[in-house]
Amino acid sequence: MMLSASPSSTRSSLEEMLDSLRRQDEYEKPKDLPPALPARPTSRARLPSARKSLPTDFRTCEENGRKGIVENGGKRSELEGKEEGKRKEKELGVKRNSFGSKRMRKEQGSVDSPYFDGMVVDEVKKDEVLEANFIKSTKSGRVEWEDNVGYFIKKKLRVWCPLANGKWESGKIQSTSGDEAFVSLSNGNVVKVSTGELLPSNPDILEGVDDLIQLSFLNEPSVIHNLKYRYSQDTIYSKAGPVLIAVNPFKDVQIYGNKFVTAYRQKLMDNPHVYAIADTAYKEMMGDGVNQSIIISGESGAGKTETAKFAMQYLAAIGGGSDGIEHEILKTNCILEAFGNAKTSRNDNSSRFGKLIEIHFSTLGKICGAKIQTFLLEKSRVVQLTTVERSYHIFYQLCAGAPSLLKETLNLKTASEYNYLNQSDCLTIDGVDDAKKFHKLMEALDVVQICKEDKEHMFAMLAAVLWLGNISFQVINNENHVEVQADEAVTSTAKLIGCSAEELMLSLSTCKIQAGKDSIAKRLTLQQAIDSRDALAKFIYGNLFDWLGEQINKSLGVGKQCTGRSISILDIYGFESFKKNSFEQFCINYANERLQQHFNRHLFKLEQEEYELDGVDWTKVEFEDNEECLSLIEKKPLGILSLLDEESNFPKASDLTFANKLKQHLNANSCFKGERGRAFCVRHYAGEGQLFKLMHQLENTTPHFIRCIKPNSKQLPGIYEEDLVLQQLRCCGVLEVVRISRAGYPTRMTHQEFAGRYGFLLSENHVPRDPLSISVAVLQQFNVLPEMYQVGYTKLYLRSGQAGALEDRRKQVLQGILGIQKCFRGRQARLYFYELKKGATNLQSIVRGENSRRNYATVAQRCSAIAPQIQDEQLTAIICLQSVIRGWLVRRHLNHMHKLKQSIPVSAKSKRRVGRKSSEVKDIPLEQLQILPSDVAELQRRVLKAEATLGQKEEENAALHEQLQQYEARWLEYEAKMKSMEEMWQKQMASLQMSLAAARRSLASENTGGEPGRHDVTSPRYYDSEDTMSLQSMGSRTPGGSTPSFVNSLPAALVGRESNGTLAVVNNLAKEFEQRRQIFDDDAKALADVKAAPPASNTHPDLELRKLKVRFETWKKDYKTRLRETKGRLHKLGHSEVEKSRRKWWGKISSRVS
């Protein structure tokens, strides 16, 4: 319930506080500031109720040590009221003969200045803006107003002068005569106009401002000029308070793309832009958790569809995820444009339907799905076109770009052969390739996952609609009844829609009338048949369009990550008015009226009602409301739509009866005008159950408005028609929005919210802790001027830009607090972590120790249990192994002894030689004397053969050496390594040769050792010094010589028994030497071939050389060891047996001598 103030009641404590603050600010204001603002008129708001009383401990601020004076509230005297009225008359400029008085009376203050509305301007602009103020301060401090016209003449300021053609021209006042003024225009002409028609112009520094709020004087010519100036600079976006104005450039402007998306996302740019609107909606959705909506409106051709694309582009860029859903959303534009856009007389790509794109986001701000709602499709365009217009783009794209196989399947012709398309004589659009558009459409259909079969059915329905238009009728009687002509159109249509030609012909030429339980077939007249055919075509296309929207929504289906957060983008075709408007156009205009009502409600009604209800000192801004027009259309039971439903139920209703009913019931409405005959007119400010659902959905979101402006009707760049732009701005209510935004308080917070958000910034602690006191104290601490805020009963209202300083300070303090908390919490966390780590380490050591002890005890117990068994098993295995090895050794020794015994044949004793030799060997067994010469001869033969072989190989080695030298000349890199290898090889071969020669001489000396008179035996040192003897070259040959025969020098038994084993060892060594020599020769030759050949990628000669050297060294070491053992055995055998023979021989000689 509204309460009014009693004349005798005292003033509230809130009013006392506000007056005290005003007096304090006036007293402390510096002398160099501009003159004080005129006092605001008394608010018409209700007084606070008892439930909203101020806290009991609230105190007003002190002023120079004294308490604020509390005045008793009484009724102002009549004289004071008159003086206040005169002062307001002066402020509003309604005094007779004052500047712009006639227009001000008409528009109630359309000329605004920062001094009237408390606008904050930049320091750089302050001096020039102050030129627009018409006040001066007298010595006594009283504010007096000068004559407006005289001030402009003195300062030579510009004014806006209306011309006879209705346009405005800038000029300067030269002189005045009564109510008339002589104005010098910019082109040099001087015109005489009434001073009441003049409007002030803004200073040059405010030319082309981003936001119309910044204009010192807000009037129609100033707004038109500001938008025109920005349009000439290709700056198509401007702000009008919370509304973005977008002027269609009709050309590509380089202000879009990833570079600009990043700039607006990172706040590197703050110019008005559709990206900025989308970014604001996104951040408010993520921050407040409230669904947002971007409502794009304007006339046909104003650029609404393109603006919606750019908004979607920005949201897709900042909300793009890994699944590519944002790419699918952008591709839907191509599909919906093909099926829902057409060329009209005003726009080459006009949207003939409305769409609401609802984009859903996850908790992380990523797009998780979308939903598209379509409504008000203009189905009549399928069957009826006017001149220079086209049907929907998809028909022309299908005829131009379909592949030959698809054309053959659908029996497609060119677009000029279909009646639905050729009736307007406009089949193409300049600069548009329908074939390329069709290919892009196919790509988009693939992106939204429409299968091949569905696409074929879809194209079949489109072809069926085209063939339906070619079906013709023939009148068969005088009653104008018709029948369908059977031709290609009928058969093609029937085939495409899946019925027989006879059924189709019957359904198009007859209709069934239900009479009770029976139905009667009635033939149709020519016009009825045409209407029936067209209705079928519209029905097919309308259902196809709805089905396509369902398929798109299935592809964009919202997943499980949906959190209910969404941003809706509304793109609806704009208001249009023709000489003859169809019902569909009426519904379109009705939808625009509803959107305008939504616009007015949020920007005008709700805001001003909130100011008044909360007791804010506010002067209401009047605006033109379209409520009366909406009532005319939708009011029940006497609205146009209600009367249309009622009239449609009458069997004999017609256009004339419906028009007469409207004239009868609606003539009293100022928005309705009846015409002659069947016509009537609706005066719009700027349909259906579906529209109410849309408006209900928009009411649950936070709206962001974009007004698209069409600069010219020729759709050409660089042309700016002021009358056309002004008409659109008036319909949009831009001037009213700017006035409310300039005088209003866009930032509003409850006292509790404001105190909770900024209360911690207070530097004093003695302030009362109630929310209102804290809020006022914060504002005073940050020196916020009184005209920059209002204190309401429940909320605190701030003008634009005032919350920014508080937010910056809050952010700075919070960052400092967070820094301190971070360090403190970090130290606490580290200490706690160290304690946990220490405890965990101790616990782990105890647990691990206990586990180790338990494991050791378990293992020890297990070992002690199975140790005897394991020991017995191991001992048994060892004994078994030893028995096997010993048995094998015994058997091998036995076999060796057996073979040795068999190798010594029994022979007769040799006859004694004459003289000394016969006496030395007379006791030698005859068997030994017979076998020894053959063995020695065999050994000599083998040695000689080995020597010959060695000589031959030495010559081959010399030749190989020469070849290697030739190859080394080809590849110098391996010269040193190969030379070293060859020298080493020569030395080793010489060493082996010397070893064999030593073995041969040893055998020879042993044979000669038993001869009479030769008691010296070759010293063993010859063999021991083998490694230190000088090595001969590979070319040197071991001097050959026949080994002296000593068949009779040794006992036959000795030689026979030991020579067999020695002979076998020497044979094995000789064979191994031959084999190894052949192997190394082959390797050396292969290595030489590799050197001579070009180097291959998989061969490494250096590595192969090292491997060959290692193998040779290994074999040489082993061979020398075995050769040394053989020579030792030979030496031992010869020495021991000769000594024994000597002793026997010497004993026998001695016995004979004695």
Image (cartoon, rainbow, N blue to C red):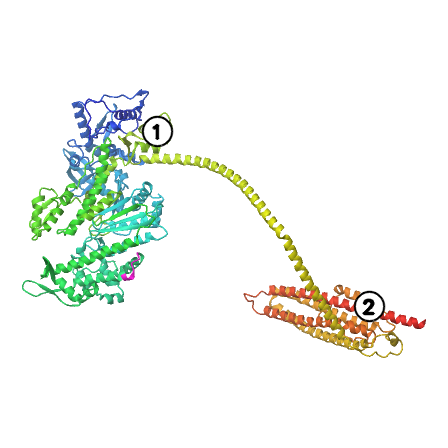
The quadrant holding residue 1017 is bottom right
Viewer-nearest of labels 2 and 1? 2
Splitting the image into 4 quarters, where does residue 398 fall? bottom left
Residue at image position (55%, 67%) is 1096
Disc 2 to disc 1, C-alpha distance:
127 Å
State which quarter of the image contains the N terminus. top left
Amino acid at circle 1:
Gln
Give residue 781's mark: 1
The magenta segment: 448-453
> In x, y percent, where is residue 300?
20, 50
Prevalent SS, magenta region: loop
**Residue 402 is inside the magenta segment:** no
Q: Is residue 450 above or below residue 766?
A: below
User: Which quadrant does the C terminus fall into?
Assistant: bottom right
Q: Which residue is mark 2?
A: 1136
Name the foreground residue: 1075 vs 1025. Answer: 1075
Q: Residue at x 65, y 55 (%)?
A: 871
For the point 31% across and 57% down, the residue is 447
Is-magenta flag for residue 450?
A: yes
